[in-house]
Amino acid sequence: MRQRRIGTEGPWVSAIGLGCMGMSEFYGPTDEAQSLRTLEAGLDLGVTLLDTADMYGKGHNERLVGQAVAGRRDQVVLATKFGIRRDDRDPRQGRQVDSSPEYCRQAIDASLRRLGVDHVDLYYLHRRSPDVPIEETVGAMAELVQAGKVRHLGLSEVSARTLRSAHAVHPIAAVQTEYSLWTREVEQDVLPAARELGVALVAYSPIGRGFLTGAITRPEDLDPSDFRHSHPRFQQQHLARNVRMVERLREIARDAGCTPVQLALAWLLSRGEDVVPIPGTRRETCLRENVAAADVELTDDQLAAVAAAVPPDAVSGERYDPAGMATVGH
């Protein structure tokens, strides 16, 4: 597996990482045994960046990842996050953004226990509370570095201004945000700021939450419990328009000798050596397809055709519902 670096002084990781969120919830029924096999296969294939968070499955995902890396800790760059509290009384909607220093200190110890490790390599602020100064949050995160509980710091879904303010307090190794062919807002301000500061861009949902596979053409293709039903882009009035773009990607992928998934990932990898996609999957077959994208070389003409097939202003619908959109870009 090709390698890319997380920040100017951070760890080297596989060019394609593995997002683990869907192994615990959100995308329909889960299978823990299947997920563990996929995690183990990823390590065997040279995937070294595993991404989790304390809120995924209300801790289940960290325990799952911890089980997979037991005995193989030195092969993994382990990333987790804090900043979203879950209410046990309302497991789907009871979420509260909390980026307070107090919660930061509390959350890391709980994450380390669930993961079964003495430190994490990359610790993200998952979402930022606008009423908590980012300098206070990052100051508390920096204390964790000094304590040896965390190696490097990251932020998720923040503005360029917040990234600069945070970096002035303590070096930020990575900023994580949704980034794919059909979610490119990060290119306007956040990615340029990250490059100015030497911060890596870790791209979650790089296959458009599965849309760019071409397998989702109508809402009924999703499990009834799938949280994508709440996302405007997957609702009928928007989905019907978006599907036309995927049809063109299928043609380009066929000409390039790869799958639409690999085409989308190869395009994203071409955006710069500082971009690290973390596609999520529960299935080993999909994992292998994703990993193989690191070896797909697209010509300049093919890259231009891909970008033209999915113009940023042609995508119909917001990427989150109003409640979700209210938590990003602070």
Image (cartoon, helix red, strand yellow):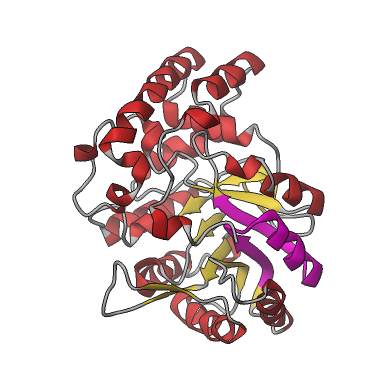
* Res 141 visible: yes
Quarter assignment of residue 161: bottom right
State left or right for residue 48 relative to residue 68.
Answer: right
Q: Is residue 216 visible?
A: no
Which of 300/2 is in front? 300
Relative to 178, is 315 above or below?
A: above
* Whether residue 84 is situated above or below residue 89 in the rendered picture: above
| Residue 183 is covered by the magenta coloring | no
- Residue ID at (73%, 51%): 194
Q: Position of residue 262 (x, y in %)?
A: 48, 30
Q: Position of residue 108 (x, y in %)?
A: 55, 80
Return the residue nearer the eye: 262 or 291.
Answer: 262
Q: In the picture, residue 304 is in which quadrant?
A: top right
What residue range appears in magenta? Answer: 151-177
Quadrant location of the N terminus? top right
For this rendering, which residue is in front, 265 or 158?
Answer: 158
Q: Answer whether residue 157 is magenta in the image.
A: yes
Quadrant including the C terminus:
bottom right
Residue drawn 22% across the image and 38% down it: 221
224 displayed left or right of 293: left
- Residue 299 position (above or below residue 330): above
Q: What residue is at 64 percent from the left and 63 percent from the top?
A: 154
| Position in image of residue 226 (x %, y %) | 26, 52
Tally of marks: 0
- Residue 322 locus on image (x, y percent): 40, 55
